Amino acid sequence: MKKRILLICACVLALLLAGCSSQTTATAGSASAGAVSGSVTATITLSGDTASCDSDAVKISGGTVTITDGGVYAVTGTLNDGMIVIDAGDDDDVELVLNGASITSGTSAAIYIRNCDDAAVTLADGSENSLANGGEFVAIDDSNIDAVIFSREDLTLSGTGSVTIQSPAGHGIVSKDDLIITDGAYTITAAKHGITAKDDMDVSGGTFAITSGKDGIHAENDEEEDHGNLVITDGSFTITADGDGISASGALQIDDGTFHIVSGGGADTVTRTDSGFGWQGQTANTDDVSAKGVKADGALTVNGGTFDIDAADDGFHSNTDVTVNGGEITIATGDDGIHADDATTVTAGTVSITRSYEGIEGHTVTISGGAITLTASDDGLNAAGGSDASGTQGFFGGDVFAADSEACITISGGTIYIDASGDGIDSNGDIRITGGTIYVSGATNDGDSALDYDGSASITGGTILAAGTTGMARSLTAAGSQGVMLVSTGSQAADSTVELTNSSGETLVSWQPNKAYTCVVISAPGITSGETYTLTAGSASTEIAMTSLSYSDVAGGMMGGMGGQMDGQMPGQMNGGQMGGGPGGMGGQPGRR
């Protein structure tokens, strides 16, 4: 992951250095962001069906305006059916300054950058501009033009003006090379991608209102592994996409910005039914189009920003790793809130997943900081092997009994609130808790448990209070000096307080689970062997004498590994299901994840 991020940074730095020497402020008589000089070389005046210009470097044939030499060209006026073509030398830098320009091409791009060294389109200060295609793209050469702004070369977009782009048959903006956006206001309606780059894309500012039939912002290069990267360091984004809100075929890094994203129609387009053996998913997205909020085929890193995501599919998704190092994140999704095929890591930030199938998922899930609140119709935290199969489960669910020794949930810090209709914390391998504060309101049925794992589950520090049912109840192994309790509370109502006090009356942990419960798992600093504690849960009160570091009064309750027994607990429970029918168990009931 570090190599990928360094590669992106190096690429972006090189691009910025290449253009920074020529940047000036865009006004009616000057240009910025990649300009060759601080003054306008020529002015192109658009007038209905044709245009005029005094420069020999500008060729005009009907509605087609062709620029053949480097320089800064101010564009103003209206072109009813035509286009501006940049066809300069290989070493020429060309900048268009749009200053009240309106260009419509009935059958091609409004702006086509065929050849130059670097190209820039600048929105003049305070200007309002519009670019449109008429509804079809007819080939004029071998470039397969399919966007309102179409560039075969490196392209920089900047300025403090605005542009409205209409593309009823294709993309809004396409660069077949690198794309840099530093500023400007962009309102884009496109049948396909809103903004796309073949190589790498860097967005450091601007305001974007994008409605797209495919992805809102898209970087892709399936021919070179070190391209297809996307870096966003700032900007304001309002994206409504039938596909992904923001996607990259390489690595994707977001440092800051404000993001309002609706993808695939949002979470309400997905319906799920519970067969009794796992949730079956169905989505309105019948074309099997990816409809994720923010997606990367490579590593996805979020260092900051404010996110409001409503997605039919995952909120954050990576085919490799997801790392959240900060930000204010709100996600509602028909699938996983945050999903990585490999490692999901949260170190800081505020994460609120208001609706999901599974809240946070990865082959490994590591949480060392941050404030996390999540609601899941299945598992809250899930460590599972393989790629995301949510919504496509078989009769027993997608990963039932899929034990994986490398899958692991590790929690060393942060504050986590979990409301799960399936398992609260579920690992196909191990669970390791060394710190943090964790509250779990688990399922109200006996087919799931607040904690579930196929390997081992240990705690050495931190605080956990997990409420659920006794049918498949699992506990933790006290791997250090801090004790663990699995206590039957009887049937208690939702929002009834669970409180543990020591013999001096000091409260060690207190919380109100938001669903009904019949047992709790508690571990907190101050629970030690040889002491006596009082647990109050709703209307019930139990005195607990810790004769060792592990206590359980739940018949069949289990600590330890898959199918094994530790701390004197009952054998025969595997993956949340009682396969051996141990004493006090439910013999023969199949489990599910």
Image (spheres, rainbow, N blue to C red):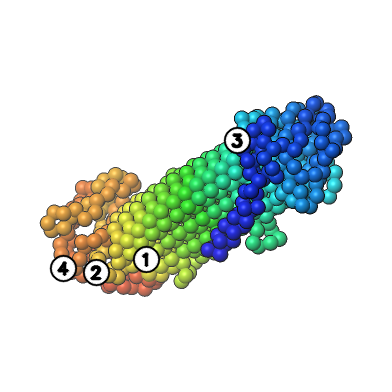
Q: How crowded is mark 1: few (under 14 residues within 10 Å), some or many (20 or more)?
A: many
Q: Which residue lies furthest to the right in this view?
A: 61
Q: Residues within 10 Å of mark 4 (few under 14, many from 20)?
A: few
Q: Which amino acid does label 3 sit on?
A: Thr
- Give the CA distance from mark 4 to mark 2: 12 Å
Residue 570 percent location from the top left of the image: 31, 70
- Give the CA distance from mark 4 to mark 3: 70 Å
Among the two numbered marks 1 and 2 on one chain, the one whose residue lies closer to the N terminus: 1
Which mark is in front, 3 or 1? Answer: 3
Among the two numbered marks 4 and 3 on one chain, the one whose residue lies closer to the N terminus: 3
Judging by the rendered image, the residue that carries numbered circle 2 is 481
Drawn side of residue 122 relative to residue 304, left or right: right
Q: What residue type is labelled 1?
A: Arg
Circle 4 sits in a helix, a strand or a loop, which is it?
Answer: loop
Q: Which mark is residue 530?
A: 4
Instruction: Identify the residue at horizontal 41%, vertical 54% (top origin).
Output: 348
Among the two numbered marks 4 and 1 on one chain, the one whose residue lies closer to the N terminus: 1
Residue 34 percent location from the top left of the image: 67, 45
Judging by the rendered image, the residue that carries numbered circle 1 is 432
- Give the CA distance from mark 2 to mark 3: 61 Å
Judging by the rendered image, the residue that carries numbered circle 3 is 160
